[in-house]
Image (tube, rainbow, N blue to C red):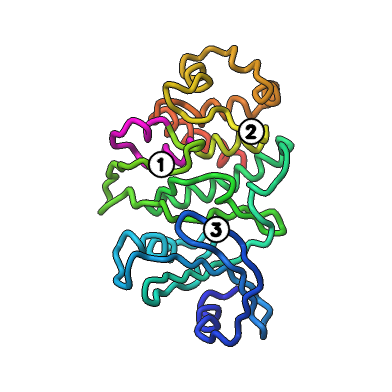
Amino acid sequence: MNKEKTKAHISSKKEWEDVKFLGVGAFGYVRLLKNVKTEEFLALKEVKCKSASSSPEELIESIIHSQLEHKNVIQLFFWRKFGPTLFMYFEYANGGSLGDLKGALAEEDALRYFEQLREGVDFLHSRGVVHRDIKPDNLLLTEDGVLKITDLGLSSIFVWRGVEVPLRGFVGTQHYMAPEIFTGRSYRGPPVDMWACGVVLFNMLTAGLPWSTAISNDNNYVLWVSRKKKIFSRKLWDKIEGLSSLSLLKRLLAVDPSERDSNWLQLRRQENTHQ
């Protein structure tokens, strides 16, 4: 779908019909639109802002997303704000999300999706953007199986004038949040996304989660930190004990963010060598 052509189409409301409700998030809801002339589809996200005036915080998703274009990031064609409502017109991924898939995936399928996720996250980081809410529901799929990262409502710029800056804030979805976020101190952006990618991979392989929250009063997380492998007797870990992905998971879920960062870079180099 041509971005400029689509933007021109959007300006004519009569050409679009409301097809169905797609979902609701923390900051708004999404509906499916169809162009009655071209039969093209768009996903319209509406966000209710606090007032008609536009604050940078309320427009962060639209401002950041409009600068991004990659095969593994959902495309934002156009956005505008009328009164207190922000309208964002996105590419429509018609295969649902990873969160819609039922049951554990075969390792081959999980790794295929993970590779696409890694490429999309690498692209975001190369543009100085950290997502901060990577999870299955925010990973859309086309009918051809192409993974698309969506929902940058909690994203942030972590590079300012060529210099990486620390982030703060209790941000994300708890099951996928890195341990450093829970400390209340500042943290680096990219390793937070890397951790979430590890939890997503675990979820794809087991249809479950490794622990509830990466904090010191979660017994499963404490066992992970202390390297007591008896945790792996649990049924979920039994599913991946013999898989090659287990070593990958251990690298992605390194408790030390600097280890996670170096492991991610090493993984990327290995994949580039094999291409």
Give the x, y percent position of residue 24. Answer: 55, 58
Q: Which label lies toward us, 1 or 3?
A: 3
Q: Which label lies toward us, 2 or 1?
A: 2
Give the x, y percent position of residue 205. Answer: 67, 34
Estimate how packed mark 3 is, as few (under 14), some (14 to 19) or many (20 or more) residues with alpha carbons within 10 Å. few
> Does residue 60 appear left or right of residue 45 in this picture?
left
Residue drawn at x 42%, y 27% as measured from the top left:
259
Which corner quadrant holds the N terminus? bottom right
Q: Which label lies toward us, 3 or 2?
A: 3
Whether the magenta-drawn stretch holds residue 191 is answered as yes
Rendered position, 189 above or below 145: above
Q: Which amino acid, by three-letter code, is at mark 3?
A: Val
Q: Which amino acid, by three-letter code, is at mark 1?
A: Pro
Residue drawn at x 40%, y 52% as measured from the top left:
155
Instruction: Report the residue marked by disc 3.
Output: 24
Instruction: Report the residue marked by disc 2.
Output: 208
**Label 2 with label 1: CB-CB less than 8 Å:** no
Whether the magenta-drawn stretch holds residue 38 is answered as no
Range of magenta residues: 179-195
Q: Which amino acid, by three-letter code, is at mark 2?
A: Gly
Mark before the other along the chain sequence, 3 or 2: 3
> Does residue 272 appear left or right of residue 101 in this picture?
left
Mark before the other along the chain sequence, 2 or 1: 1
Q: CA distance from mark 3 to mark 2?
A: 23 Å
Mark 3, secondary structure of its residue: strand
Disc on res. 190? 1
